[in-house]
Structures are given as C-alpha cells and as structure tokens.
C-alpha cells in the first residue's frame, strides 16, 4: 500500500517536475515567476485535442504539433510582452503581472473558441496496468514517467554539455557580462522560452491523457511553482526534486490521511522547508551587500 | 579620556577567507578618526560589522558601554550610529527633503491613532520634522533642491544628502564611507570644513573611510591603517605618514595602480 | 432612486475598494507582493457570517470578529514568512490562500464546505458600504502621510538604508501585512453580508491576483491610483456584460497592454490632487508652448 502510493506520487510528481523545470529555467534567466507557464501547458493540450478531433491526424502527430505549438506560443509570449518590459527596465514584478494578464487572456481565448467543457482524447492509451510485486502500474503512468525521465535527462545534457547550455548558464549568472562576452542574450532567452514551452506542451498532453482537458487546467502549475520554491528558485535540479517530493507527499497524505487536506500538507511542507532553508533545498543564499 | 566606542578583537570570516582579523579600536568622544588601507583591506566590512549588516565571527563591540554584537541594523542606528554608504543608497524615487524626513523616526513620537485622526500631537511632530529637515538641507547647501528627485541629483550632492539623512536620525557616532569619492580637490576641502562644522554643531564623533590622502591627513585626529584585514598601524597622522609598513602596503599599492 | 442593479454595482465597487486599499498599502507602498489577500477576505467573510448566523451577533460585532481573526492569522503568517525574499514570500502567501480554501472545504460541518454557507442576513446596504469605503480610504491616506507610511515606503525603496536610519524593517513589513489582512477581512465581512451566500471558490487565487493587478495597474505608491483602477476594473467587465465570455479575454489583454504602454501604471508615484493636476496642465502647456516656439 505504501509503495503503491509512492509510485502514484512519482507519476504525478514527474509531471510537476516537468512543468517546474521549464518554469525554473525561465526564472534562472529572468528572475520572474512566469505565471502563464501553466497556461502554455493548457494550450498544448488543446492543440493536440483540436488536431486529433478536427484535423483527424494520428495521435502521435497531434502530440508533435502540440509540443511544437506550445513552444511557439511560449516564445511568442516573450517576443510580444516580456521583452518590451525588460527593455523598459521596469521592476521584475511587472513581468509577473504581464504574465498574469497573459494567463487570463489564454484561458479565455480557449474558453470562447473551444468552450469551457471538459474534454478527453478518448482511448488513445490502453487503460491497462501491470502488476509488479504487489504494486499495480498503469501503462499511462509508466509511459509518463519514462517520457519525463528521458526529457529531463536530455535537458540536463543540453544544459551541462552543449554550447547552448553554456550560453544559458552564462546568461543566468550574469546577463550583462554574458552580453559583453558576445552571448546574444535575447536569442538565448527566446530559446529558453521555446524549450520551456516544449516541456509545458508535453506536460499538458500527459495531463490531458491522465485527467481531462479544460481551460483552467493550467492551474496545476501552482503546484509546480511551489515545487520550484521548495527546491530553490532558479535551480533546475531543485525544481525536479521539489516536484517529485510534493507529488509523493500528496499521494501519501491522500492515501493515508485525507485527500481533502492534501494541499494543507503541501503548504505546511513549504513553510517548514523555507523556515529551515529560506532559499529552498538547492537554492543559493543571497546576502544583500552594502 | 572619554571613550565612546570600544571594539576589541573583531573578526569576520567569509567561508575560509578572513576579511577582518583582530581589529580593535577605541574612539574618543568628539574626535575624527580615519580608517585607511588599500582596496579590499576590510574597511567597509568593518562598517558593515559595526552597523549590524554582517555579524562578527569574533570579538566585542560596544557603544558607550552598550553591546552591539548580534543587534539588528535598525537597533544599532537607534542606539546612535549613523552611516553613509560607499555605493550611495538613497531613496532615489523620493524627493530630497523626503529622504531626510524618512530618517526622522526618532522625532515622531505619535502613535497610529494620532496618525489616523491627525491629532495635535501628530501635527506638532510633523511640523518639527519638516522644519528640522529643511535646516539640515540648508546646512548642507541642498536647500535649493529640496523638491527635486534624489536620484536626479549630481553625484556630489547625493553624497551630501546621505550625510544629511544620517544626521536626521540624531546619531552620536557618524560613519562616513568615502565621503569625498568623486569630488575634486576644491570640493574635498569644502567637505573637510563641513565635517568639522557638523562635528562641533552636533557634538559628534566621526569615523571615516577615505582614499583622498589630503582629506584624511587634514581632518583626522587619529588614523588606523588596515591591510588584508589586519591593523598595521594606528596613530596620529604624522606617525602614520612616517610608518614604513604603511608606505609599503598603502602607498606602494597606489603607485602601482597609477602606473 | 438608483436601480437595484446599480446599487449592487456600487456596493461591489466599495467592497473591492476596501480590499484593494489594503493591498495598496502592502504592495504599492511597502513593496511586498502577496497572493494571500483573498484568503484573508475568506477568513473575514466566514468568521463574520458564522458569527451572524450561528451566534446571532450584531452586524458590527461580526465584522469586527472577522477583522480580528484576519489580523491574528496575518500576524502569525507574517511572522513566519516575512523574512523570506520576494518570490519565496509570494509563493508562501499563495500557499496560504490555497490552504484557507482547503480548510474551509474540509471543516464542512461549520462552514458548509464546498456547497457554501447560506442565509447570511443582508446587512451591507448602499450607504453602509459607501461610508465604510470612504472611511477606509481616509484611514489609509492618513497613515500614508505619517511616519508609518514613510517607513513602509523606506522598506520598499531601500531596505539597507532604511535600517541604517533606524527603521525596523521587519516590524513595518509585519504592520503593513497585518493592516492589509485587516482591510481584506473587513471587505470579506461586508461581502458576506451583501451576497448572503458564500462559497470558498469566491476567494480563490484569481481573486488575490486581481487585487494585485488592480494595484499595479493603478500605479505603485499611489493610493488614489489604486482606488481609480479598482473602480474602473470592477465596472469594466460589468459594462461589457453583453459580450459575455469575451469580457475576460479583453480584461486579460488590457492588463498586458497597460503594463506595456504605461509601465508605471495609471498614477505611479503620484496622488490625484489639485496640485498635481495643475502641475500636469502646466507641464502640458509648457510643452505645447515650446513646440510653438520651435515652429
């Protein structure tokens, strides 16, 4: 029973981790909470739905379109809104407010074009489970975890081993220095938004497969934000750690205590961790220098 | 001898690096004391330790017998240590006079109810605060720009405004971190006269960090020289000027820099 | 006499103005961004509603009870979280807002849970709402023009310098936070006694986000900006009611557009006053005059 809940938690937690890693990447570069990140995932889920139902394309192609589409919407959001605010040298919080506006816009855009109804992709993935030493594993859960592990490892390699990753790391440690050293910061920011959007799109489709597709499904990103804070804002490994921790804890609280109190425990965990480590599990402590 | 500040064996380590080591200082009431040394010698770190921004890893500090170690910055300021910052920290969005008024918390004795109902007590305190702020600005020659935005002032005026703001909090000990930075010779000498003037008028003790040697030698009663966190000399200006290790550490570095 | 629809709108504007005034103190003046204010509003609403319905307390007593509970919880939460840096604090308050909803739903024997709490006596009349809103704004305005407002501003502008002149920044963050919780709790109590029926969903994270958006759109460091923005943003969706679902789409786009076009908000760093209007007009006249001179 306990192990079963842990496995369930890992499945949900991996989705949190996928959203949180994109959110964290953007945070590490720009230092703002991208409030619309969850809605990008929602847009991805809807693109797949529309491609599948109206476009009649095979589901794998719908998924590819969803991922590409979410990446593009994410990148566009930077080009249309955030870049101008950055260039204005407005406070970082203004980026967040713009993201909130964007979030409302995207949700209602879907609401008026597709409608507020709950939708599903139908039986694309067989609802079967594999029994393994007393634990039952859903095919979908296994697939979800597998895809996400591959995606996150790929992200790790991309950031850690490639020239692109080096540029991102340079830009996130100091944007001015990076641009002096010849890194095209705006290009990197755009690419990071693209990458974060791709991950969000993936998460959106996976969520749509597991639950439902509806205009406010992006609010699951709140959990991802909390995961980022628990792990340490701006740290991608922290985001993954935080996501998995919260997923597992939710499953355990839901399974053994009360599903109604799940969020209360998440919050208690958040506060407890911040009291001990004010910058999250893997975050750096920054001291304001006089 | 009437000591106002007493620091003994002060130390601060960042990670494994010793920024300040075994720093001791006795300040006599009413004196102007210089703190000099090459860049990175730990001067500003000492100011930050004295004002509670950093907490020391060793040693004791006391202002007129009151322990300062472990207190919050605001508490130390309330006990009577005022300061300016090397990299100016004004309230840039606010007007010049508001910068000074901001620091007048000691003169506002009214409570929240007084503020909500604008009682006589509130009006009396506020009038007094405004009047004093204008006086301080006049004293520093900033009376004409009191409604300008602080961030829009030229560099030299911003440094003066920081001094005015520090004085508004009624300190007994004033820490000035490179007050003459960015000033030419003439302005520096004007500043010297001004510092002497405020010391007398407000019965202050002054501790200052400064790179302009002409200012330091002119104004300071005593000087402490630091290098790599260690005190290498402590004495009156003449003694310091003649000290061999000071010349090696400090002046040597300056000539290197100029070459 | 006003139609009941118009009266309802005015009452709604007044309630929002009270809540936004608190957020203005916290965000506009102290520089703290919080997503917990709808949570405090929920506390005020439920406490006052339960006091009225279950304990038959007089309206005023119920309201005060709601405000007090919001203040006490606000004090505790602030104590725990105000030491955190910007976004960490934000997410902590966001989590708080969620928890309030979860707990209200969980303790459904007392609160009615997700089905809601009904039969609250309709005590918030037009006049009560207007008088209390004006009073709240006046209290906030007077606080801003005192050492309290100055210390809030000092925290927002430059914490290190504020401490260096003897301002206990933590204490004033705490004060601003508790004040904003009290305003929110007050607004919540009035809200409950206007709608007569409350559900946890009314006080979700989106509600908190709307308060913050309102203050930023109105302009930081401007109470009058917050109030104007609140009136406009509350009425705007109502005016476009005929466009039904499109109104929130426009709302979202308008928020993005305002941040892009007028980054300092409607009234950033200025208060609406005769002096300010005169200055603006003079500046405008000066500009046209210099243009004329050029041509």
Image (cartoon, helix red, strand yellow):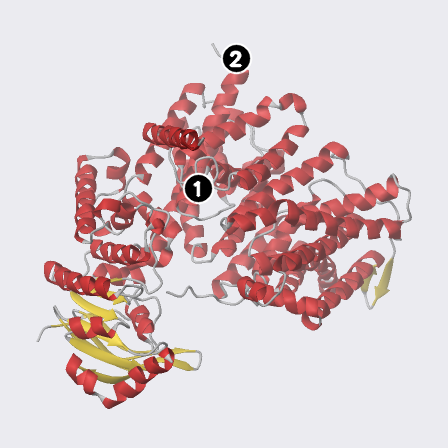
Compared with C256, B61 (above or below) is below
Compared with B1, C138 (above or below) is above
Name the foreground residue: A145 vs B21. B21
Q: Does the residue at mark 2 contact the one at mark 1 (Cβ under 8 Å)?
A: no
Give the residue furthest to the bottom: B244
In the picture, the quarter occupied by the C terminus of chain C is top left
Give the residue furthest to the top: C1
Q: Position of residue B138 (x, y in %)?
A: 18, 49
The crowd level at tag 2 (other Cα within 10 Å; few <14, some 14-19, many 20+) is few
Badge 2 and badge 1 both on one subunit? yes
Q: Position of residue C73 (x, y in %)?
A: 44, 47
Give the residue furthest to the left: B1
Dot 1: element: loop
Chain under callout 1 = C
Q: Position of residue C101 (x, y in %)?
A: 57, 43
Question: Which residue in the protein does label 1 denote?
Answer: C220
Q: Residue at x 16, y 77 (%)?
A: B222
Quarter of the image for residue B118 reads top left
Dot 2: element: loop
């Amino acid at each position: 029973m306990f192990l079963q809940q842990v496995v369930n938690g890992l499945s949900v937690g991996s989705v949190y981790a996928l959203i949180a890693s994109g959110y964290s990447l953007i945070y590490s570069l720009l230092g703002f909470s991208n409030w619309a990140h969850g809605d990008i995932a929602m847009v991805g889920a809807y693109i797949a739905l529309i491609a599948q139902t109206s476009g009649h394309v095979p589901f794998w192609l719908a998924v590819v379109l969803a991922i590409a589409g979410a990446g593009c919407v994410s990148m566009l959001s930077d080009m249309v809104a955030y870049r101008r605010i950055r260039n204005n040298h407005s406070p970082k919080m203004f980026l967040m407010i713009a993201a909130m506006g964007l979030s409302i816009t995207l949700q209602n855009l879907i609401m008026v074009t597709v409608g507020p109804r709950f939708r599903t992709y139908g039986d694309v993935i067989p609802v079967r489970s594999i029994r393994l030493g007393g634990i039952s594993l859903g095919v979908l859960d296994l697939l979800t975890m597998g895809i996400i592990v591959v995606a996150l490892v790929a992200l790790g390699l991309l950031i850690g081993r490639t020239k692109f990753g080096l540029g991102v790391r340079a830009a996130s440690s100091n944007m001015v220095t990076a641009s002096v050293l010849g890194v095209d910061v705006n290009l990197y920011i755009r690419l990071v938004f693209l990458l974060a959007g791709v991950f969000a799109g993936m998460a959106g489709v996976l969520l749509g497969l597991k639950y439902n597709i509806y205009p406010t499904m992006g609010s699951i990103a709140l959990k991802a934000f909390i995961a980022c804070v628990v792990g340490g804002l701006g740290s991608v490994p922290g985001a993954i750690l935080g996501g998995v921790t919260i997923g597992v804890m939710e499953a355990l609280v839901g399974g053994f205590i009360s599903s109604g109190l799940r969020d209360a425990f998440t919050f208690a965990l958040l506060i407890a961790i911040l009291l001990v480590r004010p910058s999250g599990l893997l975050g750096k402590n920054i001291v304001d220098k006089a | 001898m009437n000591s106002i500040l007493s620091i003994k064996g002060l130390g601060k380590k960042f990670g494994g690096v010793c920024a300040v080591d075994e720093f001791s200082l006795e300040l006599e009431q009413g004196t102007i004391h210089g703190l000099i040394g090459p860049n990175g010698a730990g001067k500003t770190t000492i100011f930050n330790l004295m004002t509670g921004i950093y907490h020391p890893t060793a040693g004791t500090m006391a202002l007129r017998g009151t322990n300062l170690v472990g207190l919050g910055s605001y508490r130390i300021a309330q006990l009577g240590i005022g300061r300016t910052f090397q990299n100016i920290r004004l309230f840039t969005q606010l007007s010049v006079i508001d910068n000074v008024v901001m620091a007048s918390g000691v003169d506002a004795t009214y409570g929240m109810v007084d503020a909500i109902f604008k009682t006589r007590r509130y009006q009396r305190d506020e009038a007094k605060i405004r009047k004093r702020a204008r006086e301080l600005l006049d004293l520093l020659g900033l009376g004409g720009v009191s409604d300008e935005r602080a961030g829009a002032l030229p560099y030299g005026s911003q440094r003066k405004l920081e001094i005015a703001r520090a004085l508004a909090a009624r300190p007994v000990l004033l820490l000035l971190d490179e007050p003459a930075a960015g000033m030419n010779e003439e302005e520096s000498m004007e500043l010297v006269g001004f510092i002497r003037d405020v010391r007398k008028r407000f019965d202050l003790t002054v501790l200052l960090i400064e790179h302009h040697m002409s200012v330091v030698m002119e104004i300071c009663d005593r000087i402490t020289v630091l290098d790599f966190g260690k005190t290498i000399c402590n004495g009156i200006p003449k003694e310091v000027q003649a000290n061999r290790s000071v010349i090696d550490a400090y002046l040597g570095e300056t000539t290197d820099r100029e070459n | 006499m006003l139609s009941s629809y118009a009266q309802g709108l005015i009452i709604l504007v007044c309630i929002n103005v009270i809540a936004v005034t608190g957020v203005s103190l916290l965000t506009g003046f102290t520089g703290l961004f919080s997503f917990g204010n709808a949570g405090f509003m929920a506390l005020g609403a439920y406490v006052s509603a339960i006091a009225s319905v279950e304990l038959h307390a007089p309206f005023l007593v119920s309201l005060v009870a709601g405000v007090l509970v919001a203040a006490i919880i606000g004090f505790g939460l602030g104590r725990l979280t105000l030491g955190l840096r910007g976004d960490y604090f934000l997410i902590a308050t966001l989590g708080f807002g969620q928890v309030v909803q979860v707990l209200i739903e969980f303790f459904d024997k007392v609160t009615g849970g997700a089905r809601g709490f009904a039969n609250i006596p309709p005590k918030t009349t037009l006049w009560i709402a207007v008088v209390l809103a004006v009073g709240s704004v006046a209290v906030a305005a007077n606080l801003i023009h005192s050492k309290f407002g100055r210390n809030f501003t000092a925290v927002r502008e430059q914490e290190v310098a504020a401490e260096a002149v003897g301002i206990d920044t933590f204490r004033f963050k705490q004060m601003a936070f508790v004040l904003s919780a009290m305003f929110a709790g007050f607004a919540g109590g009035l809200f409950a006694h206007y709608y007569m029926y409350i559900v946890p969903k009314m006080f979700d994270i989106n509600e908190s986000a709307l308060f913050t958006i309102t203050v930023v759109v109105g302009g930081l460091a401007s109470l009058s900006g917050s109030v104007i923005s609140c009136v406009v943003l509350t009425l705007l969706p109502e005016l476009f009611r005929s466009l039904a679902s499109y109104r929130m789409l426009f709302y979202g786009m308008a928020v993005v557009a305002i941040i892009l076009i007028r980054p300092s908000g409607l009234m950033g760093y200025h208060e609406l006053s005769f002096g300010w209007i005169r200055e603006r007009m003079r500046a405008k006249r000066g500009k046209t005059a210099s243009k004329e001179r050029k041509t």
